[in-house]
């Protein structure tokens, strides 16, 4: 019988995977979650037969999920399955061009050459370089703590640094991409990867050119049942491992004594544990649970990643010209990001992302209809709950899609729900509704994210998108792996 108790605050993807890892390690784990179910930003609802995943829609690196089942010694198939997607994304440009990012690099390169006049060798070379940087550099920095001397002193780290080129650090992603491609379409397409962690390609470093490796080399996947199948599977696995969940139970403070964590306070009473892992946004953890306004203010010195305005539309007809993931680019990408990150304003001609899971699986929408997840990037903290601001963007989206698809979109909308930055913050306590914690806009941003430990409070750890190595499902799962590596085995 274990005598080691661990408490996890929050059941986002980082909290769920940490709970699984600690249970495997022999801890008696309790997860406290303020909402009525697990998943955090991975939410779900159904409206008139349309299924909507509310948050993430792009699934990469499924191996991170498989690892959790392997650690538990439980076969994954009964809980979770997925399939590879043949086209990572379909891109629509205002000049009428349409580019399919085929799963096979050779096909993708051929498509960019045929449609945009890009040099196919440049595309292949870019993806190879992306793979190299990810394998040699990305893996080390994403899978280890950057706050431990052992990471930096390890020979593999010193070797890794040799693979970092000047352009990866000193150039912005945009200038890095301009140095690799001749067509504006390829530059814009590869610039978009900065948004995968809520950043601006005109400020973020060329190092983000490792992100396409995950999508274009390793592949994108569709989980059976939609994205909600991910937290559902992890919740079921955690329950099988004996993790207990207290839903509708917000933690109100973290208890500590003489520089050591003692447990948490929730429901007006203490719960004791020698190990506490916070999956709550690190700003709110410091401000509200540790009551340390100084530390909380220091966290705000790092710029937040972008947020989003999302419309969930039940569409009364099918659109054969669309795929699972679709992007409708703005004409002036630089102006769009200047609005979002420098002026902190919404942009009147936003790049639009549409995700349609009914393209992959029956039952995601009524027959002959489609479930559209329509998202535009907006600044974190954008106030869009007021109808006028929302309406303006909605009108811009409808106008752009109708024009680019040649179909009047508004009459096709059968059901509509909306999520704003305020809604994202209310649902998950993510500061200002940012999707991915802090942005990567500064050259050294990756090294300045909050650590997974707390130097002043032993036994307290942090996991999830607001801490190292950052936001997005794969990185949140890696943050749990890093936390796991720091916590000793149960007594
Ligand atoms: C609209 C949208 C689109 C996205 N698209 C993608 C995508 O396509 N691919 C991708 O990989 N990522 C995407 N992301 C990012 C991804 O969703 C997040 O990085 C990731 O899910 C964050 O997980 P987390 O572990 O940080 O926890 P979160 O999901 O932030 O969950 C934190 C949990 O803690 C709970 N909590 C907070 N405070 C307390 C408290 N005091 N007591 C108890 N519980 C508390 C919250 O209720 C919540 O359940 C998207 C995010 C959004 C919102």
Image (cartoon, grey):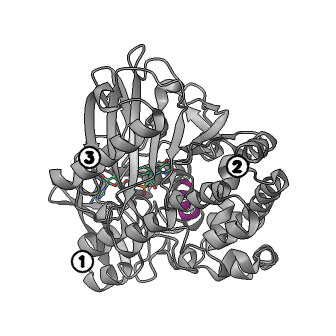
Q: Quadrant of residue 156?
A: bottom right
Mark 3 residue CB less than 8 A from any atom of ligand 1: yes
Q: How far apart are marks 2 and 1 (CA)?
A: 54 Å
Q: Does the magenta stretch include residue 479?
A: yes
Residue at which label 3 appears = 35
Q: In which quarter of the image is residue 245?
A: top left
Q: In this view, does 24 lie to the left or right of 271?
A: right
Q: Distance between the residues labelled 3 and 2?
A: 47 Å
Residue at which label 1 appears = 291
Q: Which of marks 1 and 3 is nearer the N terminus?
A: 3
Q: Is residue 72 magenta?
A: no
Residue at which label 2 appears = 116
Q: Are marks 3 and 2 in contact (CB under 8 Å)?
A: no
Q: Is residue 312 left or right of residue 141?
A: left
Q: Residue 266, percent across and down?
A: 21, 58
Task: Tell which residue pokes out farthest to the right in this image.
Answer: 121
What residue do we see at 67% from left, 63% from top? 209
Magenta part of the chain? 477-483
Instruction: Tell me the chief SS of the magenta region.
Output: helix
Q: Residue 17, percent across and down?
A: 50, 50
Q: Residue 32, percent across and down?
A: 31, 52
Q: In this view, does 380 lie to the left or right of 203?
A: left
Count neighbours of disc 3 (C-alpha within 10 A) and say few if under 14, some if 14 to 19, many if 20 or more: some
Camera-nearest residue between 4 and 307:
307
Secondary structure at numbered mark 1: loop
Question: For residue 392, which numbered disc appears in the image?
Answer: none
């Amino acid at each position: 019988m274990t005598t080691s108790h661990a408490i996890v605050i929050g059941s986002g993807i980082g909290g769920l995977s940490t709970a699984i890892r600690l249970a495997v390690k022999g801890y008696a784990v309790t997860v406290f979650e303020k909402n009525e179910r697990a998943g955090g930003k991975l939410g779900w609802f159904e409206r008139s037969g349309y299924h909507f995943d509310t948050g993430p829609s792009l699934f990469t690196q499924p191996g991170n999920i498989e690892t959790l089942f392997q650690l538990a010694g439980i076969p994954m198939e009964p809980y979770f399955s997925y399939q590879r997607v043949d086209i990572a994304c379909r891109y629509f440009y205002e000049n009428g061009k349409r580019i399919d990012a085929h799963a096979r690099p050779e096909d993708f390169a051929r498509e960019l050459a045929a449609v945009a006049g890009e040099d196919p060798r440049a595309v292949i070379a870019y993806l190879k370089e992306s793979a190299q940087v990810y394998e040699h550099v990305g893996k080390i920095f994403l899978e280890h703590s950057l706050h431990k001397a052992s990471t930096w002193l390890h020979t593999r780290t010193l070797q890794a640094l040799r693979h970092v080129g000047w352009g990866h650090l000193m150039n912005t992603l945009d200038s890095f991409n301009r140095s690799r491609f001749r067509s504006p379409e390829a530059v814009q397409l590869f610039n978009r990867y900065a948004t995968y962690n809520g950043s601006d390609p005109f400020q973020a470093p060329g190092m983000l050119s490792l992100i396409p490796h995950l999508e274009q080399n390793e592949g994108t996947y569709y989980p059976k049942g939609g994205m909600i199948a991910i937290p559902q599977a992890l919740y079921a696995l955690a329950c099988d491992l004996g993790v207990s969940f207290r839903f509708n139970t917000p933690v109100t403070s973290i208890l500590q004594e003489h520089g050591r964590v003692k447990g948490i306070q929730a429901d007006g009473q203490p719960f004791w544990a020698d190990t506490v892992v916070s999956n709550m946004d690190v700003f709110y953890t410091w401000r509200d649970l540790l009551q340390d306004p100084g530390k909380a203010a220091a966290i705000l010195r790092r710029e937040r990643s972008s947020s989003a305005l999302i419309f969930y539309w039940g569409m009364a007809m099918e659109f054969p010209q669309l795929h699972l993931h679709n992007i409708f680019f703005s004409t002036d990408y630089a102006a769009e990001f200047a609005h979002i990150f420098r002026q902190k304003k919404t942009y009147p001609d936003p790049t639009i992302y549409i995700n349609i899971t009914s393209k992959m699986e029956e039952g995601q929408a009524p027959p002959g209809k489609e479930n559209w997840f329509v998202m535009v990037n907006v600044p974190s903290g954008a106030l869009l709950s007021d109808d006028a601001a929302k309406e303006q963007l909605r009108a811009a989206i409808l106008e752009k899609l109708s024009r680019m698809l040649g179909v009047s979109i508004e009459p096709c909308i059968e059901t509509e729900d909306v999520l704003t930055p305020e809604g994202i913050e209310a649902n998950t306590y993510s500061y200002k509704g940012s999707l991915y914690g802090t942005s990567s806009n500064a050259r050294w941003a990756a090294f300045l994210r909050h650590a997974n430990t707390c130097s002043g409070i032993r036994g307290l750890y942090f996991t999830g998108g607001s801490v190292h190595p950052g936001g997005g499902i794969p990185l949140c799962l890696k943050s749990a792996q890093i936390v796991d590596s720091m916590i000793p085995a149960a007594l």
